[in-house]
Amino acid sequence: MVTSSTPLVERLDWDSQFFGREIGRARVGRLDATTADRLAYDARAAGLACVYFAAGIDDFETVLAAERLGCHLVDVRVVLERPELTTIPSGASDTDFRIEPARDGDLPQLERIATEVARLSRYAADPRFRGEETERLYRTWIQNAWNGYVDKVLVARDAGGDVLGFACPKMHGELCDLQLLGVAGAQRQRKLGRALVLAAMTWGREQGATRMQAVTQARNLPAQRLFQQLGFLTAEVKLYYHLWLTPDR
């Protein structure tokens, strides 16, 4: 709980170490003129270079306060949820690929696809994060997934053994969280994304999940349409900002 004496920001150790800059996150999701000034003061007092801040899309007072503070809008984050996994649509039977768990030797191909996913991220939308930093972040993410951060790494594989895409589900009680979905750019017209989501849904149901969640960007219309076609409903929309407190280097 945030009290009157609690700083409105917290330092993010992992992000700070990874990017080599002091990175923090706002502890609050609402701002007015007073709390905006206090957030900036607390961030500077903590020596932060950048603060991540998320606001409700319908909170106009907060949006105005964030803009006046100098926050940079980097993402419109859409959370979609399928409220039940009892009925799962069947996949296409005439595909020339198969869905299976990742295996030894797949990581380099997963990393290449992850760098493509990185280009749609909020870090890619912020010019203060260099392209190579963003790509390295997503390579690190898929490496961590491979090493057990998620519960399963599912891949779409062609007849020659090449990885065409991946899905990374993680269980949280009865919720199956699809943490990352990626399809190689040259393969995006082959319904790989649909097959991977269906496989993740089936896997989640087998683990006892009763519902499933996925996150995408508002600008990623193909992903939103895919999830909606599979019965996902929009559960939350957030505006993500970065507040920079140091000069560009």
Image (cartoon, rainbow, N blue to C red):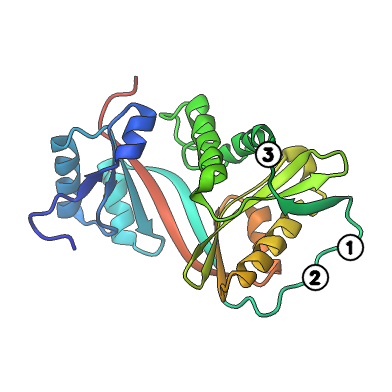
Q: Is residue 177 above or below residue 67?
A: below
CA distance for labels 1 and 3: 27 Å
Badge 2: residue crowd in 10 Å (few <14, some 14–19, many ≥20): few
Q: Is residue 120 above or below residue 154?
A: above
Camera sees residue 90: yes
**What residue is drawn where x is 85% and y is 63%?**
92
SS for dot 3: loop
Give, as a three-letter code, the residue at label 3.
Answer: Asp
CA distance for labels 2 and 1: 9 Å
SS for dot 2: loop
Camera sees residue 124: no
> Looking at the image, do the residues carrying marks 2 and 1 touch, with CB atoms under 8 Å apart?
yes
**What residue is drawn where x is 53% and y is 43%?**
147
Depth check, mark 2 against mark 3: the one in front is 3
**What residue is drawn where x is 82% and y is 40%?**
161
The residue furthest right is: 94
Q: Position of residue 168 (x, y in %)?
A: 59, 52
Q: In which image quadrant can residue 201 be found?
A: bottom right
Q: Position of residue 203 (x, y in %)?
A: 65, 65
User: Where does the C terminus fall, quadrant-wise?
Assistant: top left
Q: Which residue is mark 3?
A: 104
Q: Which residue is mark 1?
A: 93
Q: Which residue is mark 2?
A: 90
Q: Position of residue 31 (x, y in %)?
A: 24, 56
In the foreground, 3 or 64: 3
Q: Is residue 216 left or right of residue 109?
A: left
Give, as a three-letter code, the residue at label 2.
Answer: Ser
User: Where does the N terminus fall, quadrant-wise?
Assistant: bottom left
